[in-house]
Image: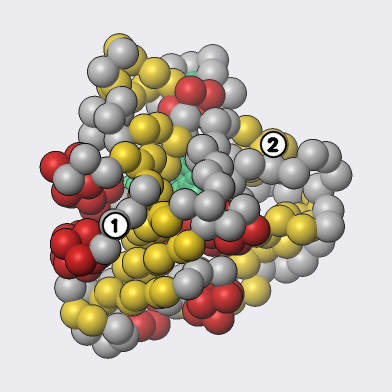
Amino acid sequence: MKLISKPEKISKDHYLLKIQYQGSDPIPGQFVSIKVNEGTDPLLRRPFSIFDYSENELKIVFKVAGKATSILQNSALPENTDISGPYGKGFTPLENSKVLLIGGGVGNAPLHYLSNKLRKTGCNVTYIYGSRSAEYIYCRDDFHKCSDSTYYMTDDGTDGEKGFVSEKLSQLIKKEFFDFAYICGPSPMMKLCADILKAQNINGEVSLENYFGCGIGICSGCTVKTVNGNRRACIDGPVFNINEILL
Ligand SMILES: Cc1cc2nc3c(=O)[nH]c(=O)nc-3n(C[C@H](O)[C@H](O)[C@H](O)COP(=O)(O)OP(=O)(O)OC[C@H]3O[C@@H](n4cnc5c(N)ncnc54)[C@H](O)[C@@H]3O)c2cc1C
Ligand code: FES
């Protein structure tokens, strides 16, 4: 796998990267692992979800958070970037179902690819896109194209409605039936949404974005608790059922 574009700024602090990939179609929710330079700082590879895939071109969206993502952002020689994957257990694909997708911040990235796939398998997709404010929202047109209804929620009310995705979730499930929900975003957001869904007996999955070490199942640095004991998020996840994971 190799980078085929320099980072394209798509909103405040968020960048899109295109990667050449030849292999079978990735499963939504899987991630690629990137070593941003040849040196030892940073030493560890970083995981990034698949935002989109078609015709040997895979896309990721990254938010500048620290050392590795700052290097990626300023990457003048993208061919030095070492990329592997796709890895991990992705989302369960459904067909002909009414589904709800709930994303927070950069956590919307894997849900975009998922949403595209779900529409192709006859699902009706309702999307709740959460962001701190309007300036952080990315690829708005793409999200519109891959959902039947889209709701924007911002912390400061600068786009869509002011409030949290969990509030919109509570409103929607009072008036509409959903077969399944898919969630990705900050841990407190995912916990709140999962609790609301479980209370209404709606099944769903979350994609975790916790810290990874090796990213390939060796170091146990990504251990999470589930009702079935400890699991390694990098190989047993990052997607888990909301009734299995202990958030
Ligand atoms: C399965 C998976 C998929 C991911 N997909 C994406 C993606 O599509 N796009 C994207 O931008 N990021 C994604 N992430 C998170 C991404 O891997 C981290 O943001 C990245 O490792 C940061 O590296 P860094 O060296 O730039 O920042 P660091 O120097 O490692 O961290 C900078 C700051 O960000 C905080 N931070 C870093 N990582 C995390 C984290 N995982 N959770 C909470 N806080 C964190 C640290 O506390 C620190 O304050 C994903 C993570 C996982 C596990
Ligand atoms: S990150 Fe090393 S086992 Fe998961």
Mark 2: give few (<14), some (14-19) or many (20+) Cα within 10 Å.
Answer: some
Q: Position of residue 174 (x, y in %)?
A: 16, 62
Q: Is mark 1 within 8 Å of ligand 1?
A: no
Of 25 and 138, the residue lying toward us: 25
Asked whether 88 or 7 is in front, the reply is 88
- Seen at 39% across and 82% down, the residue is 135
Badge 2 amino acid: Gly
Quarter of the image that includes the N terminus = top right
Task: Indicate which disc residue 177 carries.
Answer: 1
Query: Which numbered tag is attached to residue 85?
Result: 2
Q: Residue at x 26, y 18 (%)?
A: 227
* CA–CA distance in space, label 1 to label 2: 36 Å
Q: Is residue 15 above or below residue 177?
A: below
| Apparent side of residue 176 relative to residue 85 in the rendered image (left or right) | left
Between circles 1 and 2, the one closer to the viewer is 1
Which image quarter: residue 3?
bottom right
Query: In terms of secondary structure, where does tag 1 sit?
Result: loop
What amino acid type should be assigned to the residue bearing mark 1? Phe
Which class describes the residues within 10 Å of circle 1: few (<14), some (14-19), or many (20+)? few
| Residue drawn 48% across the image and 17% down it | 219
